[in-house]
Image (cartoon, helix red, strand yellow):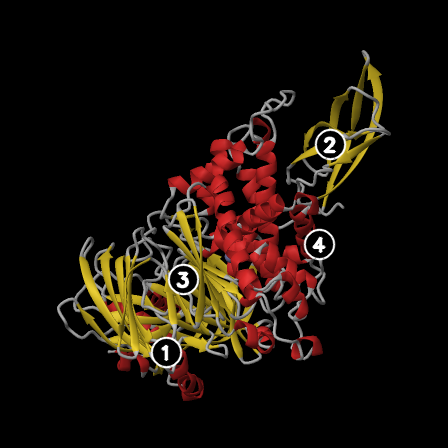
Amino acid sequence: MHDQLQSLRLDASHVYAVQNLRLRRGPLNLTFIQGKLALYAPLDGRITGAVFTGNGRVTLTPREPSEKLSLLHFLGVPLLDQNFTGAYLRFTDETAVELDHQLEEQAGQQSLPAVSDPFFTDPWDAVLPDLNTWHSLRILCDWLGAQPRPYFYAGIFGSSVGPFDILMDSRREEPVLVGQARLIDKVRFFETWVSLPATQPGISTVYDFQPLSYTVATTIHADRSLDGDTMLKIRAVRDGERVLALNLAPELQVRQITDGAGNSLPFFPSTEFDQSGKSGSGTILIVLNQSAHTGQEFELDVDYRGTVISDAGNDVLFVGERGSWYAHLPGPDRFVPFDLTFRWPRHLTLVATGTKVEERQDGETRVGHWITPQPIAVAGFNLGEYERYTAKGAGIELEVYSSRELETALARRVRQFPSTVSADPPPLGGSYPNPEDPRIRDAPPPSNSAVALTQLGKEGLDAVSFLEKWNGPFPFAELAVSQIPGSFGQGWPGLLYLPTLAFLLPETQHLVGIAPRVQEQVNEIVPFHEIAHQWWGNEVGVQSYRDTWIFEAMANYLALLYSDSRKPSEHILENFLESFRQQLLTHAPGSEEIVEETGPLSLGYRLASWKDPTAYDAILYGKGTWVIHMLRMMLREPDEPDAPVAAAQDPDARFIALLHDVLAQHRFQAISTADLQRAVEGHMTRAMTLQGDRTMDWFFDEWVSQTGLPSYAVEFQVRVVANRFQVRGTLHQDGVPDLFTMPVPLYAGRENGKPVLLGSVVTSGPETKFQLWCAFRPTRVLIDPQRTILSRTK
Ligand SMILES: [Zn+2]
């Protein structure tokens, strides 16, 4: 069947001259104004495609602010309205019937007979084999299942923007997708212009299958290649599905897939439709023996081999594919038990997520077995020639694994930083060291790594106990910190990857020529950011790409709180917040927009466009950190404006309760931005109630779903009324939509003495009048001197 689909061509004897054919699909309107149209030849009596050449027009107007902003960013207008000269349609829905119906109607009115027109069909037929590839598999998914989920696709040849794709597919997490594939330096990028969630209620079980457990056996050979076998226990959550998708790194070739009864199952390697530079986007489609029924549990055994471990030199190995070195189901984070077995060359040390229950030697290999006492969403491992250092704290043991080769090879390794791919980004605002810099090239071998290791272990333990105060108990039984080449880190459940740089003392970092800004990032944020991910990312997981900002922002903010607490006099939190602000206000190269205007936080990885590679980091990490800071600052306000905060009460009590609540209520589950918002609403103060009811819609709409940074200015007069000073004036708000609202604290300044809080003014447009009282005559009115709001105003 797949081969037949793949070799499908047009029905050359039926080419129609058409006028004003229309197709409507939800928010999408396609009009074939004038031109020629041909249908695909039927297969099993079913027509699965059509092509059109002529004049047409396509419109789509999303309601979601984030999608309007995305269109504005890519196309310059907040809606899709494009003329086109050609279209390639594929579908399993009612399109063929609809087209047929309209063609019959037109034939009745104007007698438009179908003719044979090879000049029209031949050029199309020449390109169809390439275009068919993805669709043949997609159509197969619907035809094999007992309850198909129809899709509609239009490849549009836009008159002014070039070719772009429109896909409406309820098998996707977000069914409506409009975007454009681009080749930049031979790398394929998919720019997502619009992605819309399911508009019909009831389409919530996008994923037909969910994992119950993973058992992964991996043999790592001396040449770094691996043989792997993942045994998945799976439950079907929807009736009638016969094709199951698994993710596996494209570098791993599947050799065989069997079901629980030992039957070998057919499978097809595929890709995500909008595959971009994302790692691990390899997909395998597996055809089950029969359609699944709801609640059915079954096993799959996937056998594969390939290479996902790269050698960074000197036996420093690096597992590059987060979570796709084993076969797993796509979808939001699902917390399940993992059972991991490894065999690896005996001279290496292997660290993995979970608790090690066995390790032994077997000839030239070592064999180890790990299980997970708590369910986890993703498993990882690392291996190398490690030195081990153990730090014991209250209730937790922290093990630090650093590469033995560190000292002699560092100078050389530093030269490899620029080519390192990053999961967490390169240091914000920092530049990578120039490998040709003689200070790096000719640097003497750094020393004192043992001291650095001890320090890292101690700091790690200290950070864990600091973060327990904010987050609640450390979620795992152990924490291993292992070294990876490069300048980024990654936090797996109970296992951290930290960059080589973090394993060096500051003097050594300086010696090998690391820029001070990068050094600061590595020392004050990276290790603690990764530790904070143990809660934010590993104790609770991510529902969708639209929610990843929560985890990066929380991890960053908590890391800064920790660093700040260690050296209060250095104002680390304040300084980082200011540098994030500066980055957001920077103009993207050759653009009118500031970086912040690239798109809202809720666009997640879609912010990483080739247009401005810095936008993703600046927004997800920088603006995200500010959003958490603003929430914390608002939660610190006393509920009664005049009530002094009791000395014993921690001003952060509400913020801490919020973090505890989110983590405790969603322990080992995936959370969304809506979950966070609901939790904030459970702890919000009266002052945060801007909309009359206990909702934080205003805040999450403005700061998460939309772009815009306000700037503020104030005018005021003072008069004496009954021995008190009345301060009346206007607060000007600019740079944001008129409806933007924000409580802005105003302080009264005087010649001698600290400024005193006058009160918060809730802005209600470009100009907000206010009237506040003061015990002295203020000489000036200061806008938010404590920097609790992310604004353009310095
Ligand atoms: Zn992170």
Q: CA distance from mark 2 to mark 3?
A: 49 Å
Q: Pick whichever, 791 or 358, lies toward us.
A: 358
Q: Residue 760: x and y, percent?
A: 68, 30
The residue beneath circle 4 is: 582
Q: Residues within 10 Å of mark 3 (few under 14, many from 20)?
A: many
The residue beneath circle 2 is: 746
Q: Residue furthest left?
A: 261
Q: Is residue 322 left or right of residue 432?
A: left
Q: Say which label, 1 or 4, has the lower sequence index.
A: 1
The residue beneath circle 1 is: 133
Q: CA distance from mark 3 to mark 4?
A: 39 Å
User: Measuring 33% from the left and 57% from the top, which residue is drawn there?
Assistant: 354
Q: Residue 176: x and y, percent?
A: 43, 59
Type of the residue with mark 1: Thr
The residue beneath circle 3 is: 168
Residue 14 marker:
none
Q: Residue furthest top?
A: 722
Q: Say which label, 4 or 2, has the lower sequence index.
A: 4
Foreground mark, 3 or 1? 1
